Amino acid sequence: MTEFEKIIVSRNSIPSLIITVVLMIAIPVIFFIYWRRKHKEQTKLSWLIAGAIGFIVSARVLELGVHYFCILADNPISRFINGNTAAFVLYGIMMAGLFEECGRYIVLKYIMKKNRARENSVLYGIGHGGIEILAVLLPSMISFLAVAVMFSAGDTENALRTLNITEETAAAALPAVQSAAAFDYGMMAANVIERLFSMFLHIGLTVIVYYGVVNAKKMYLPLAILLHMLMDTFPALYQRSVVPLWSVEVWAAVWTIIIVFIAVKLYRKMGVPSFAETSHHGT
């Protein structure tokens, strides 16, 4: 445990983590409030909830179930994927694209049949991207903040005991503790910018899939899957230490712009049907 005793919490760690937590909460809330106030007559909260549930089921239940077998469990398949960078990257981007976009397609086509106004597709995307922040990333930031606070007090033994870090789990826990201690405003900015990109990504991909659903054009689901895979390529390469972090941010910015550009064009092509008409056609 001597490595933990050497950890020094940066003076910027706690304030930058607090701001990150606040902004993580603010991002989906601001997106929702803005869109809901602008399109209150056209939008239904059920689409926001559907987006959140769709993400949880597709990405956090089904996809994680496959990950457990193919990545976490010890078997020939997991050993091959984890031992081969190309296989790891290809597997990762394919699973993310297939599960999230097919999940989006199934919910939009077969479940959300009422109130099919184009504004609701954006609300669905806000729900999808928002719950990813609140249920997946926010807890991680809060745990980082807790770690930074505990270790900043200087009582390493008490911090380890509170965090339930033992001799057996020390090696696995050390990188996370070091990251929390070194967290700064640069990392805060990177996390917040990444989440903004992600929100626009999920909204854009939802509009693309939705356009294919309401116009019975099958090509838009494969397009969304491909775009999602391309977006996730550099993050997957970064996980394997193939590319630097700055390149991931640049890559994300480029593909977010491309996806949003496509989505805006499709959104405008859908026109502005009245809410009464969309409600009637959705029944």
Image (cartoon, rainbow, N blue to C red):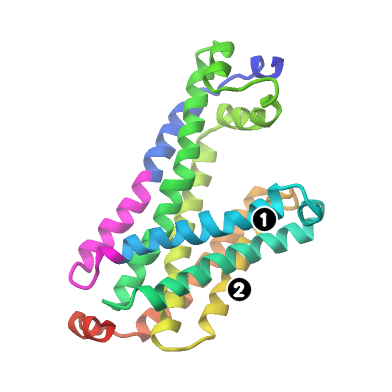
Residue 253, percent from left and from top: 54, 61
* Disc marking residue 236: 1
Residue 248, percent from left and from top: 62, 55
Residue 20, percent from left and from top: 43, 39
Residue 7, percent from left and from top: 63, 19
> Is residue 235 visible in the rendered structure shown here?
no
Of 165 and 90, the residue lying toward us: 165
CA gap, disc 1 to disc 2? 15 Å
Q: Earlier in the sequence, mark 1 or mark 2?
A: 2
Q: Is residue 32 above or below residue 241?
A: below
Quadrant (top left/top right/bottom left/bottom right) for the N terminus: top right
Residue type at tag 1: Ala
Number of labelled discs? Answer: 2
Residue type at tag 2: Leu
* Disc marking residue 226: 2
Quadrant (top left/top right/bottom left/bottom right) for the C terminus: bottom left
Of 214 and 197, the residue lying toward us: 214
Of 65 and 212, the residue lying toward us: 65
Q: Is residue 147 above or below residue 275?
A: above
Magenta span: 25-46
Residue sitting at the far bottom: 216
Of 85 and 195, the residue lying toward us: 85
Instruction: Assess whether residue 44 is covered by the magenta stretch.
Output: yes
Res 280 quadrant in image = bottom left
Res 173 quadrant in image = top right
> Is residue 31 visible in the rendered structure shown here?
yes
* Disc marking residue 80: none
Instruction: Assess whether residue 39 is covered by the magenta stretch.
Output: yes
Mark 1 neighbour density, 10 Å: few (under 14) some (14–19) many (20 or more): many
